[in-house]
Amino acid sequence: MKVGIIGAAGYAGETLVKWLLKHPTAELAAVTSRTHAGKALGTVIPGVRGSDRGIVFSASDADALAQSDIRLFFLALPHGAAAEFARVLVPAGKRIIDLSADFRIADLATYEKYYGKHHAPELLKDARYVLPEITDPKWKTEAKIAASPGCYPTSILVPLVPLLKAGVVSRNNIVANSLSGVSGAGRKLDEMYLFVERAESAKAYGLVKHRHLAEIEEQIALHTGGSSIIQFNPHLVPMRVGIASTITVPAAPGATIDGLYAAWKSFYAKAPFVQILPSGETPDTAYVVGTNRVDMSAVHDPRTGNFVITSAEDNLVKGTAGQAIQTMNLWYGWPETAGLI
């Protein structure tokens, strides 16, 4: 089945290219970029030299793409731009997996509070937020647009949602501290992301109102039967890829670490990309880079009464491109793990 990537020259697009070229069922048939139109794929993304099958970047022309025989498009674009392409492609019968934030938030007022004006609000009804391990499978028949989650939310929602649903943890006083590699900011020229600025340096940013907070809190409310206010503290650290999150949450009365692990193991019994580590063995980004996994574990602190939960993922794979491919696999009834590790 032919698929295309719109905006294939960024970090997320490049990661999609590398994984889709090896996919057993999907055929990468188009990659677009306004900057690189006419250039060979292997020239722009040297990592696929010799395996790029002669693919050449085309211009990002929504009308032309809508008339093609490509059935599904990945939108690896900034928010705002993705919605503009969806407005053309969805009426043409194309399926969309959007890696931007444009369709992650169901409530329009919330979206506009965090991101500004929405460029295709009429399509929100056709979109479903798809975190494969958590989202109800009925999305596969309801959606025309699958909104792929953000990298930080994936690292927080995967560990937290089953525990809130099971009543193992409190809904209040939840604090999530997340550390991200520099690639999470995207491929752009900005003084903040220069090597000499980031090497040997770590800093918090986006405190109090990071944009990913909106989807974290909305998804918790949708999936756990109640709302929670999260104290989310993202940090930028000197590594290329990876996210490590530490979530501190009060244990519910009578809850034990064994009960927490029982809730996880029940919820993720058939989840191939969730690895639950023994209590006390904390996940390490070094061992998830290049995979579509989330590794996670937890400990109980009897002094504070808190559970301390840790997770790790590759922000460009499980946090972005790999998760989008996982969603494609499920949407078309293919093995969930096809083309992924």
Image (spheres, helix red, strand yellow):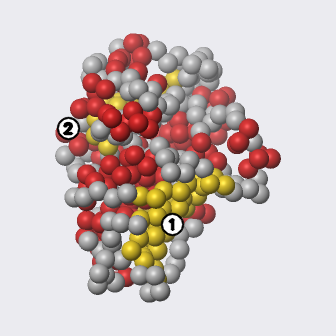
Q: Amino acid at mark 1?
A: Thr
Q: Amino acid at mark 2?
A: Glu
Q: Looking at the image, do the residues carrying marks 1 and 2 touch, with CB atoms under 8 Å apart?
A: no
Which residue occupies 39% across, 42% down?
148
- Secondary structure of the residue carrying tag 1 is strand
Q: Nearer the viewer, residue 99 or 6?
A: 99
Which residue occupies 62% across, 54% down?
204
Q: Nearer the viewer, residue 328 or 76?
A: 76
Query: Is residue 154 positioned above or below 184 on the image?
Result: below
- Residue 58: image location, x then y, percent: 53, 18
The answer for how far apart the CA atoms under marks 1 and 2 are is: 34 Å
Query: Is 322 situated left or right of 93 in this image?
Result: right
**Which quadrant: the N terminus?**
top left
- Secondary structure of the residue carrying tag 2 is helix
The answer, for residue 204, to whether it is visible in the render is yes
- Residue 328: image location, x then y, percent: 35, 41
Give the quarter of the image for residue 169.
bottom left
Which residue occupies 31% across, 26% down?
121
Residue picked out by circle 2: 142
